[in-house]
Each structure stands twice: as C-alpha cells, then as structure tokens.
Amino acid sequence: MSDWKSRLTILQDDITALDDVDAIVNAANEQLRRGAGVCGAIHEAAGPRLAGLCQDIGHCSTGEAVATPAFDLPCKFVIHAVGPVWGAGGGDREDELLASCYQTSLRIANDLHCASIAFPSISTGTYGFPVQRAANVALEAIRVGLVEFPEITDARMVCFSAGDLEAYERALSEIA
C-alpha cells in the first residue's frame, strides 16, 4: 500500500520551528530530563514548564512514549519517545525498541486527534544508533503506523543534517 508514502515528508529542518504540525516527537531519555541534541533544543524552545511537567511524570521506559503540552512551542503537543542506546550491535532488541518509539508515538498522536506529527531521527545522536539502520527501522515503523492510523495525514521525518537526510531518503526508496 503506497498511500502512506504520500503522507510522509522527509526534510532537513529545525523541528522546534515547525509551526504547522500538531505534535513533535522528542528523542527523550528515560528520566524525561533535558538532554543534548534535539531533546535540549525542544526543552529550550518549550520553556521551563516542560521540564517541570516532565519531572512530575518522572519516567518513561525505553521503547515507550508519553505526551505533554508543547507550552511555548508552536505545536500543540510534544511526544517524548525514549529510544534505545546502541550497545550490543543490535543484540539487545535495539531495532524492536526503536520501532516501538515510532509506533507508540503515532498511536499517541492518533489518540490526541493529531492530523500531523514530526519526528527527529531518534537514537542516532548521543545514543549511537547507526543512522542508516535507524532510518530503515523508523520508516518501516512509520509505514505500519500510518496504515493503522489513516487520520494522521501528515507525518514528517525532520533530519538535522544532510547526511541524515540522505540516509532517510535512501531508506524510503528501498521500501515497496
């Protein structure tokens, strides 16, 4: 089913500046604390109320996600997805846990009646997940989620670098 591809855009941009999506996904840590990379940028743009609410929530397991209001961001919601740390060369269920981040985020977005969602490349920064492998896992998980949730009409993979963009475009071209 190729309909899902018409609902997915891959681009290089600043995820915190998107003013035309309902939800953005944060590449979060289990403690939901402000981190580096996209997590730090999202916390900075959302303002201190986000950190306070995340502290109240306290924890989210790897492969899972939780939603919060977006506070000072231009979207409505931030979905905090905790990706796996790349460790044993894929032997610790890293692919499965990464796929779960994307699928759980799409389910939460659907439950929140979001028509649009933007994802970063989860786990490929500080957590060390190889970008091309992550792109393959992420796009397959997004495909499954978009088929399951047709109400989500606009999904975006927002890449930080040109190299990430190339990896995601390559992965998309390999999916039937």
Image: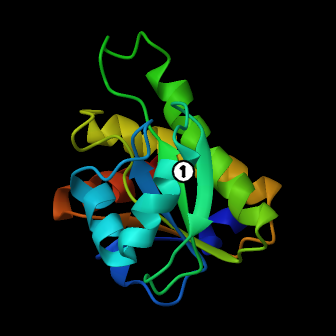
Q: Quadrant of the N terminus?
A: bottom right
Residue 80 position within the rendered picture, expressed as x and y whole percent measured from the top left: 51, 53
Residue 100 place in picture, x, y as percent: 60, 37
Q: How many marks?
A: 1
Q: Residue at x 56, y 37 (%)?
A: 99
Q: Quadrant of residue 165?
A: bottom left
Is 160 rendered above or below residue 172?
below
Q: Nearer the viewer, residue 48 or 97?
A: 48
Residue 8 shows up from this direction: yes
Q: Position of residue 32 (x, y in %)?
A: 44, 46
Tell me the colour scheme of the image: rainbow
Counting from the top left corner in percent of width and height, residue 75 is at 53, 82
Instruction: Please report the residue visible at 54 percent of the width from the left and 50 percent of the height from the top.
Output: 56
Question: On the rendered structure, is 86 left or right of 113?
Answer: left
Q: Residues within 10 Å of mark 1 (few under 14, many from 20)?
A: few
Residue hosting label 1: 56
The quadrant in which residue 60 appears is top right
- Residue located at (60% from left, 38% from top): 64
- Depth order, front residue of 136/69: 69
**SS at circle 1:** helix
Q: Which image quadrant is residue 48 in?
A: bottom left
Question: Does residue 11 appear in the picture of this structure?
Answer: no
In the image, 150 versus 1, the foreground residue is 150
Residue at the location (45% across, 35% down)? 30
- Residue type (three-letter) at the residue carrying disc 1: Asp
